[in-house]
Image (tube, rainbow, N blue to C red):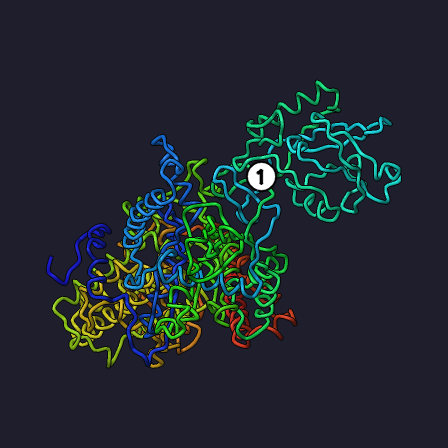
Amino acid sequence: MTDNQLSSKYQPQDVERGRYQSWLDQDLFKPSGDKKAKPYSIVIPPPNVTGKLHLGHAWDTALQDMIIRQKRMQGFDTLWLPGMDHAGIATQAKVEEKLREQGISRYDLGREKFVDQVWEWKEEYAGHIREQWSKLGLSLDYSRERFTLDDGLSEAVRKVFVTLYEKELIYRGEYIINWDPQARTALSDIEVIHKDIEGAFYHMSYLLADGSGEVQIATTRPETLLGDTAIAVHPEDTRYQALIGKHVILPLINKEIPIIADEYVDMEFGTGVVKITPAHDPNDFEVGNRHDLPRVNVMNDDATMNELAGQYAGMDRFAARKQIVADLEAAGRLVKIEKMIHSVGHSERTGVVVEPRLSTQWFVKMEPLAKRAIENQETEDAVDFYPPRFNQTFLRWMDNVHDWVISRQLWWGHRIPAWYHNETGEIYVGMEAPEDAENWHQDHDVLDTWFSSALWPFSTMGWPNEEAEDFKRYFPTNTLVTGYDIIFFWVSRMIFQSLEFTNERPFNNVLIHGLIRDEQGRKMSKSLGNGIDPMEVIEQYGADALRWFLSNGSAPGQDVRFSYEKMDAAWNFINKIWNASRFVLMNCEGKTVADLSIEGEKSVADRWILSRLNETIVKVTDLFDRFEFGEAGRQLYNFIWDDFCDWYIEMSKETLYGENEQAKAMNQAVLVYTLDQILRLLHPIMPFVTEEIWSKLPHEGTSLVVADYPVAHEAFDDPAAVKGMAVLSDLIRAVRNIRAEVNTPLSKPITLLIQTADEEINTFLTTNKNYIERFCNPEELVISTTLEAPELAMSAVLTGATIYLPLAGLINVEEEIARLEKELDKWQKEVKRVQGKLSNERFVSNAPEEVVAQEKAKEVDYLEKQQAVTDRIAQLRSL
């Protein structure tokens, strides 16, 4: 094998080995520095340093890489900024789990040493993530890599917190929040996953304190009755109006609590009486505020019962529930237990049942921030969602958003920049600690992970220094690529924080993709054991095959199903390209760029492939701009596999193995040019194999990474060649199909009669009969406008021609009529379909003119074919 030849077999491991490092060594992924070029930037959605990346990350980053590679080739000054998220609760949970395996807890280590352990974890897993990025071939500028706990990003976080606090958009208050008792931290609403589980309504009776009777209530959480401070009825409920103002005896602890009236109570639900536990239920909290009820918190932060729970102190909440139910029954206060399935909140990170808990936390006041984000979507600076329906998803969430609890009771993360005076309790919020720091202590809590990642598009660019070069040049960013499951968590927060602090949208476009599911359509999960490691897929098939599958998976916003059958198809496609490239290289060996001029006379096949290349470039470029990567892939696949490999290369053999040296030189030039353009079109999707092949071609330039992206050339547009080749390819295909039908191999010469509809087609086929002779192997070939149809022959109706294969002794007239009747049925259906479209006034008036014209042309074509088949059937029946 010479230096400019490919190995006989496509081996992705050999192709990809060392290539990524070569790109890095050449600094090909950094911005061009060309200030005249238009900037284009993407910030990577920072993966959590909690583990290795999964297929969803591979999909997400492959799409970003495709966008940035194409823009780089199109001459944009591109920046793709990498980075990772500290992922507060998720990372701390992983490290605590690791420590538990060693028999220790974070409390044994203390805050400082525990945080050191987390930093060690971060360094280890950041290394894994970078290795995976390299395996995927991501063209990231590592010189700008950021981490959400970097000094610069930490400064941005403090700046935002302090500013919002000074604007009274951050406040500290006591509210019912979602509490994760395993991680011992608050959760925001969207960090809670609701699952349907089996539970029960526990019906119990509370005795009236005056001895005049009892009232019945029902609850799903009997352990919280120890924190009841009232029971409530609706003020208009005539059943209970006489009881308002009286007291009941709280079972088990014999404590008197009042009966109050509040419109919160649903008269139609249950008995119309509800227990009010202000410290353990958000609705009860609001009722308690209205009636000035005490808040009795009966649980510790690990969901065990505290000293206010009396005899149940120290018990786990669910053990206490079981014991309380037993004690209620023993006391005669349990009426019945009604089994039910109900939705219960679980922590997204630890999986434990979330506990509504009264707690003092820091909150962001969302109403003014959300209002501005919503209003911005009505301006020319709106963030454009792809697909557009996700704009409504964003707006609905912003319209109904609650205040955001941002404090987390963790040790790993951004410490809240608030200090409390040791003696007075005064609160100080600032960028740095108070000057007399010894008299103050900092808030122990950290900020929600999303608080820092909400600043990612601009904090990574150097903000709050608004004179930072990257911030001035690359912000706002152009495109964000992310899954639809993260719109609420991240996308919305980036939008409102960016508008608040930079007066700009954070990105122009948001491309939303779906989830990767298994072959059965199930979400991939550890519990199902159906997860796929992208590194294992790359080991087996190569990164290019995985990227091709991911790029062609689905339309924007749709889920995609992974299957090894699809990976086989992706590998086979690359192998097809590899073998086609070997053919081109072997037949152009020794040629230089100067030898391969495409100026001059060309065959119809040459003109056709260049015209089809033009069409493909225009379509693929447009589809990339609209993020329709699946359709772009289909266009590329059809052009490469069908037009280039199956037709043009096969037709090239007629010239390459012939005696016309001038035609051969042109054919070689067109082969190399078309392959070069194909590799450039494919490079954003499959960078490794395209670079390998391109390096063997005669070319100018150092790397495909920075080569020019293809553009269409008007001189290559050749409708006549496209029309002629359509007839020629249909003719060859029809002859092959007829041969197969009557079991006549290509090696056996046949008589081929072609009845042409007009002189133009007649001249074209006569001029290019060498292709008919090569691909159809006729011993006799007749092309004529005046040809009379033979009686016993197989036939096929084409656009502009009808072919006949007299196959005496092989044709059964009745079978041929039956076959033609099926063909007639097909054309009748096509005529009906197209005429139905054209008779639809809405279609004709609303569709683009060229689309209507295409349908009218189809109608003429189908009617001609329908008539030709009808005539042929009539002819055979007359025999």
- As drawn, the residue found furthest toward the top would be 330
State whether residue 631 appears in this view. Answer: no
Quadrant housing residue 738: bottom left
Residue at coordinates 59% horizontally, 41% vertically from top-left? Answer: 357
Quadrant housing residue 62: bottom left
Q: Is residue 226 above or below residue 624?
A: above
Q: Which of 139 and 359 is in front in this view?
A: 359
Q: Which of 301 and 603 is in front in this view?
A: 301
Side of 110 relative to 778 (left or right): right
Residue at coordinates 58% horizontally, 41% vertically from top-left? Answer: 345
Q: Disc 1 designates what residue?
A: 355
Residue 385 drawn at (x, y percent): 52, 64
Q: Nearer the viewer, residue 397 or 456?
A: 456
Tally of numbered tags: 1
Side of 549 relative to 418 (left or right): left
Residue 801 drawn at (x, y percent): 42, 69
State whether residue 620 appears in this view. Answer: yes
- As drawn, the residue found furthest toward the front would be 423
Residue at coordinates 59% horizontally, 60% vertically from top-left? Answer: 366
Dot 1 amino acid type: Glu
Residue 594 drawn at (x, y percent): 16, 77
Q: In this view, does 247 lie above or below 680?
A: above
Question: Which quadrant holds the N terminus?
Answer: bottom left
Residue 19 drawn at (x, y percent): 21, 58
- Element class at badge 1: strand
